[in-house]
Amino acid sequence: MNKKLLLFLLAIISIASCKNNSVHITGTLVNPVKGNYIYLDELLSSEMKSVDSVKIPEDGTFSFKREIKSPAFYVLKIDDRNFLTMLLTPGEKLKLNSNYDSLNYPVSVTGSEGTELMTEYNRKLRNTIGKLTSLSNIYRQNVNNPNLPLVIQSLDSIAQTYLDDINSYTKSYIDNNSTSLVSLIALYQQVAPNVYVLNPSKDYKYYLKVDSTLTILYPDYEPVKTLHEQVRELLSEAETQEVKTNPAGEGAEAPDIVLPSPQGDTIKLSSTRGSVVLLDFWASWCSPCRQENPNLVQAYNTYHRKGFQIYQVSLDKTKEAWMKGIEDDQLGKWIHVSDIKYWNSQAAKLYKIESIPSNFLLDRQGRIIATNLRGEALQTKLAELFK
């Protein structure tokens, strides 16, 4: 055999043998529960597929090894509330140090660029959630404060600042990591259940940006294909909206709502014609809604005799929670309706409600004259109308 050809073939064999499709995960858990298991799951679009598990020894050390052909998301978990999402790339050797009861926020992660990036984002998100929680504590401390409406207005303003900050940070994070699968995870982060950092309708350009890049780089990866389908739907909805008049825009006649009250009576929104009406969407599980309710009570007590009515639509999951919210916040004087369908409420879909609290102020003919008036802004508008 030709000597040069032999050397060439040996070089190819050497390169092939160096190719590493395995990932190695090692870690140490502080204060472990001896005998419990730690699991390795693969994160797919609609499920987590368990691929391995090990029993945790007394010293808290563990190790996993897995063959993968391309970057993919995996989850280390103790249980469904105590887990760490990882982005693993072939050849990586991830090392983790964490308290046993808080895998979500590890002390340190090294050896995996994607996982390190996600851990960095999680720290920022956790900080934001902590700030929002502190505002809820301030509200509870001021429940009996006669200046509660002003306190709520201030808290709303501060909360919006925090939300705007994490929204901007997330967009910058995506811009800086647009070729990495971490940008896919960033699209779906939440500060509270069903309260997303990015809004698919308002921020759909970022969904489009991530989709257009990752579809080229990872066309066969299931989570990327799922995103691609979602983006197609978003674009279709956006195109439809451009040619449709918003049925709930200012100046339009408010679409009628026909829903049952807690007592089972069907009450139409149109039955309130002749009054100035605040159509308000809320839920007992919504903390900002509960914070706004004292302002609604004040507005109702001040202007009801002059022709002001409130038609409040609940997005609660159960009738029991809905009625308890009405009782606890002393809202029983005005009209309450709900189909108890959570975000699938027909009224919420009709008015394109994407977050709560949301409200629409209607004139005596049922036309929308203002939207999302809260705190002092609502009081000011009503004072103007009933002067």
Image (cartoon, rainbow, N blue to C red):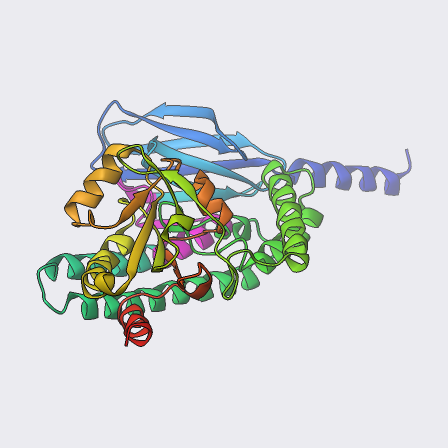
Image quarter (top left, top right, bottom left or bottom right) of the N terminus: top right
Q: What is the quadrant of residue 162 in the picture?
A: bottom left
Location of residue 290 with respect to 375 vertically, above or below: above
Q: Position of residue 69 (x, y in %)?
A: 63, 36
* Image position of 202 (left or right of 366): right
* Image position of 322 (left or right of 187): left
Name the residue: 16% across, 43% down.
327
Q: Which residue occupies the foreground of this view, 167 or 290? A: 290
Name of the residue lying farthest toward the right: 2
Q: Which residues are magenta?
A: 97-125
Q: Which residue occupies the foreground of this view, 14 or 363? A: 363
Q: Which residue occupies the foreground of this view, 184 or 331? A: 331
Q: Position of residue 274 (x, y in %)?
A: 37, 59
Is residue 293 visible from the viewing direction of this image? yes
Q: Position of residue 227 (x, y in %)?
A: 60, 44
Is residue 179 visible from the viewing direction of this image? no
Q: Position of residue 269 (x, y in %)?
A: 40, 48
Q: Number of marks in the image?
A: 0
Location of residue 51 with respect to 293 vertically, above or below: above
